[in-house]
Image (cartoon, rainbow, N blue to C red):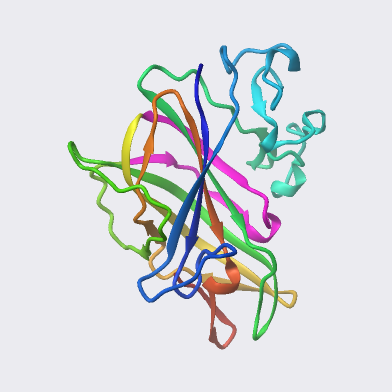
Amino acid sequence: MKHSSLFLLMVCLVGGFVILSGCTTSPGGPNVTPTFTAVPTTTGDPLSCTGDADCVPAQCCHPESCINKQFQPDCSAVLCSAACLGPLDCGAGHCRCSEGKCQVVPGPGPVVPGQATLIIAVKDAPKVKDGDGTITHLLLNISEVSVQKAAPNQTITQTDDEVSATESGETDTAGWITVINETQSVDLLQFVNVSKVLGEKTLDAGTYTQIRLKIDSGTITVDGTDYSLTVPSGVLKLNRGFVLVPNETRMLTLDFNMEKSVVSTGSDKYMLKP
C-alpha cells in the first residue's frame, strides 16, 4: 500500500516574510519548521474511479479521479467549468483559475517505483494591518517553484528546528528541478489559514536540500487604494532540506505572514522583504 504524508513547511522570515503561531524571527533570517500528517491515497489507480465508493473515505471521485477531500470538503460543489477572474470564483479548493476558466488541479498520477509526488501550496496567517492602514488585498505573481536535488552522498539533518530563508538573485540551474513553471496570481488574503494548491510534480525519491520561489511582481491594496509591491530580488530561497520516500505523496505548504513581510518605504511605496 502506498504511504503518503502531509509536509507542512512553516517559514518565519526576518522582517517577517512567513510566520506561524509559535514562530519567532531572528537576525539569522526567516525560519522553517516542518510537521508531518498522513495524506490518504487510493490503493489502486488514483486516476481511475466511477464513483466515491472507488476511493478511500477521505477522498471523493471527481470527475474520474480520486481527489483528497482536504482540497474540497464537499465534492458535489465543484465548479470547475465556470468563467473566473480569480480563485474564489471557482469555489472548490482543488480548482484553480487559469486563462479565465476554472480548471481542476489534477490528482497525483500513477507513481512508478522509486518516485514520489510533491505538492506545493501556500496560505496566509490571519489579519494584516500596518501603521499606515488596513491591507485588504495582497496579490503575488508567482512564476516558478523549484527544488534542489542533493548531490551524490550529500546528506541533510531533518529536525523541527527553525532554519533561515534568504533573498537570492542567483540564476544557477544546476541540480534544480522545476515543480511549477506557470505564473499564478495569488491574493494571499483570500487564503487565510486555507491552503491554495499551486501545483504538483512526480519526482525521484531521495534527498532535496533547498526550495526556491520566484515572485515576478505584486500589488497591495491599502485602505481601498492599489499600490505596486516591490519584490527586491524576485527570488526567495529556503535552505531547508527534506526527503521524499518512494510511493508517497507529500505536501509542502508555505505559510506567509504579510503583517511581518510587507514594509512601507514611504511615499505610498511598499516592499516585500524577507
Residue 125 on image: x %, y %: 63, 62
Farthest bottom residue? 267
Depicted 64 relative to depicted 244: above or below: above
Stretch in magenta: 177-204
Residue 110 on image: x %, y %: 49, 18
Determine the residue positioned at 59% across, 42% down: 197
Between 246 and 160, the one nearer to me in the picture: 160
- Snapshot quadrant of residue 214: bottom left
Whether residue 250 is visible, yes or no, is yes
Residue 229 on image: x %, y %: 54, 71
Farthest right residue? 76
Residue 257 on image: x %, y %: 58, 65
Between 129 and 174, the one nearer to me in the picture: 129
Depicted 255 relative to depicted 252: above or below: below
Is residue 184 magenta-colored?
A: yes
Relative side of 164 to 139, left or right: left
Determine the residue positioned at 25% across, 51% down: 172
Between 222 and 121, the one nearer to me in the picture: 121
- Magenta-highlighted stretch: main secondary structure? strand
Whether residue 102 is visible, yes or no, is no
Between 42 and 137, the one nearer to me in the picture: 42
- Snapshot quadrant of residue 82: top right
- Image quadrant holding the C terminus, namely bottom left
Is residue 88 magenta-colored?
A: no
Farthest left residue? 153
- Snapshot quadrant of residue 245: top left
